[in-house]
Amino acid sequence: MTTSSTELTVGRPRRGSIGSILESVAALIERRRLVWYLTISEVRTKGTNSLLGNIWWFLDPALQLFIYFLLVNVLFHRSQPAILLFLGAAILPWKWFTAALTTATTAVRRREQVMRQIAFPHIVLPAASVLASVGNFLFALVPLGALYLLYPDRLTPWALAVFPVAVVQFLWTIPAVITLSALGVFFRDISNFIPHGLRIWFYLSPALFPIETLQAIGDRHPWFGVLVNANPFTWIFSGYRDALYHGRAPDWIPLGALALASIPAILLSIYLFRRASPLFVKVL
């Protein structure tokens, strides 16, 4: 067969790196209806597979926020004005990221039977997975917005800046999901390590504490300061907190730099996925 879909699924790519990336992007545009169908299917499946159904989309982030509230405010006895909003501005976006990465490890593997029966560009699988993860963020906005009923003085027009900050996070979620979806085919145990790696990443980010606290630790331990400053979520969380908690403009310079830096990361992940995809059916 010589169709483009077969070339994307069977055999080694015949073009160079740029050509491979462009073909993958073109395949996504051409199969946009399939991507949308898989995205909707994944969102619906998550709702129907739980006891509480679609209510769980709202209840799960609210419960996670309450757990960290008990940890920080009750156990650590840490005083912070509008503590729930302070925590929610970081924890709820983080839940979006963790849900995306956790699902990514099986994004390709769970479609094994379909891949054996139909020739299609495999890149649509992680693309649908990352788009479905946006639902986690949108549903998390409901309990996050409800917090302004407790702290109405914190609500300002700058709260709308949460969306461009979310775009920056989404740009970094894309290469992470694409890369993990490919690795999950060859290393099935990776799903066991992801939660532990994410937990370490979370505590190296200013989610439970102000960024000034982590920077003060970095002044005493330079290696820690390097890790904090190199962490994209240091600036993403700060952006969310500026917009939602402090009621001011986020620092657009580091956020803009992160957005630009995500472009080569996205292109590299697409290229590596394209190179690995001919082996998926053989390994599965």
Image (cartoon, grey):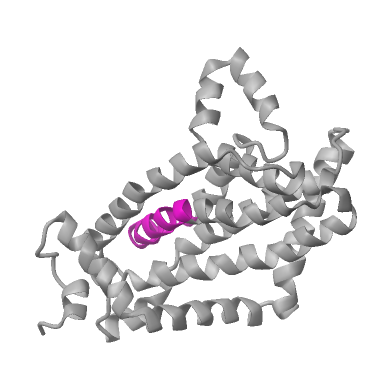
Taking the image as shown, residue 230 lies to the left or right of residue 116, namely right
Residue 90 part of the magenta segment: no
Residue stretch rendered in magenta on the structure: 171-191
Of the 4 image quadrants, the one containing the N terminus is: bottom left
Q: Is residue 199 above or below residue 146?
A: above
Taking the image as shown, residue 167 lies to the left or right of residue 93, namely left
- From this viewpoint, which residue is outermost toward the top? 220
Is 47 in front, or is 137? 137
Q: Is residue 203 above or below residue 56?
A: above
Taking the image as shown, residue 30 lies to the left or right of residue 102, namely left
Q: Is residue 243 visible?
A: yes
Residue 176 at x, y percent in the picture: 43, 53
Residue at figure coordinates x 74%, y 45% from the top left: 247
Residue at figure coordinates x 40%, y 48% from the top left: 262
Q: Main secondary structure of the magenta part?
A: helix
Residue at figure coordinates x 37%, y 55% from the top left: 179
Of the 4 image quadrants, the one containing the C terminus is: bottom left
Residue 176 part of the magenta segment: yes
Residue 206 at x, y percent in the picture: 65, 36
Q: Is residue 40 above or below residue 26?
A: below
Taking the image as shown, residue 257 lies to the left or right of residue 152, namely left
Instruction: Find residue 236 and report its image quarter.
Output: top right
Q: Is residue 51 visible?
A: no
Residue 198 at x, y percent in the picture: 56, 46
Instruction: Find residue 208 and report its image quarter.
Output: top right
Is 222 in front, or is 160? 160
